Image: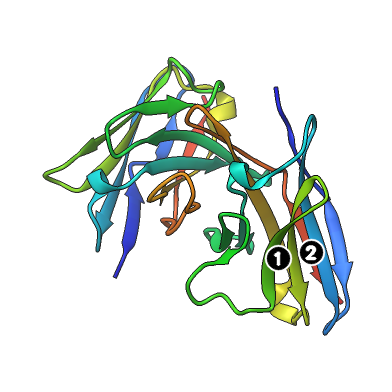
Amino acid sequence: QTVVTQEPSFSVSPGGTVTLTCGLSSGSVSTTYYPSWYQQTPGQAPRTLIYSTNTRSSGVPDRFSGSILGNKAALTITGAQADDDSDYYCVLYMGGGSWVFGGGTKLTVL
Amino acid sequence: EVRLVESGGGLIQPGGSLRLSCAASGFTVTSNYMSWVRQAPGKGLEWVSVIYSGGSTYYADSVKGRFTISRDTSKNTLYLQMNSLRAEDTAVYYCARLETKRTGFDPWGLGTLVTVSS
């Protein structure tokens, strides 16, 4: 069973830059996994940030960007703001009509 | 406006059945991939099921054989029939549009809570 890995937690200072990653327990993430990223605050539905590796969803500020870094998908937040303090999830398309979410990263801005 | 509204959640005993609905507006369910994603209390997101625009259906191993995804064209509504429910199925269930496998899950509904407990 393939596991999608994310850092459990991360912290960043206001105005700083942080890169969250999304990997595989076995193998490398590539664009063919169509990685996408979601932001979720407690009690709220997820909000789509990035899809198909690096395409920003409508209305998402350009300080959020997606890429492939080495063998992982990555979400970079440049100029972190207080309201970026959230949980972040990636999801990968595994083929055969199957998607797998990562365990999520709790980002603290302080 | 593109919008999804889930309903049908509630408290159900182990072994019971429940059907969730997801009413769509602003787009046509049958022209898109549509999916269910769940989140157990205090846990992360878990993909549950998808129905492709052509009608093919797929499921996570954890629900295969117990859950059935379907849609009603006339009501522009997505469904999730959940049978043989277990305590570990307790979660907020979200429906989400996919458009295609490339485009990610967007938008999401607000979710409906399913609690499986005696």
Whole-percent x and y of residue B104?
50, 52
For the point 29% across and 39% down, the residue is B53
Quarter of image, res B12: top left
Identify whether A7 is placed above or below B63.
below
Q: In the rendered structure, the residue with mark 1 lies on which chain?
A: A
Whole-percent x and y of residue A85?
74, 71
Whole-percent x and y of residue A25?
80, 32
Residue topped by disc 2: A107
Q: Residues within 10 Å of mark 1 (few under 14, many from 20)?
A: some
Identify whether A8 is placed above or below A66.
above
In terms of secondary structure, where does tag 1 sit?
A: strand
The amino acid beneath tag 2 is Leu
Q: Which mark is residue B94?
A: none
Q: In the rendered structure, the residue with mark 2 lies on which chain?
A: A
Q: Are marks 2 and 1 in contact (CB under 8 Å)?
A: yes
For the point 47% across and 26% down, the residue is B59
Horizontal side of residue A72 vs B84, given as left or right: right
Name the colouring of the figure. Answer: rainbow
User: Do marks 2 and 1 both belong to one polypeptide chain?
Assistant: yes
Residue topped by disc 1: A86
Query: Farthest left residue?
Result: B74
The amino acid beneath tag 1 is Ser
Horizontal side of residue B74 vs A75, given as left or right: left
Quarter of image, res A18: bottom right
Return the residue nearer the eye: B112 or B25.
B25
How far apart marks 2 and 1 lie (CA) works out to: 6 Å
Whole-percent x and y of residue A79?
78, 82
Identify whether A83 is placed above or below B22.
below
Q: In terms of sequence position, does the residue under pointer 2 or pointer 1 come before the other?
A: 1
For the point 37% across and 43% down, the residue is B34
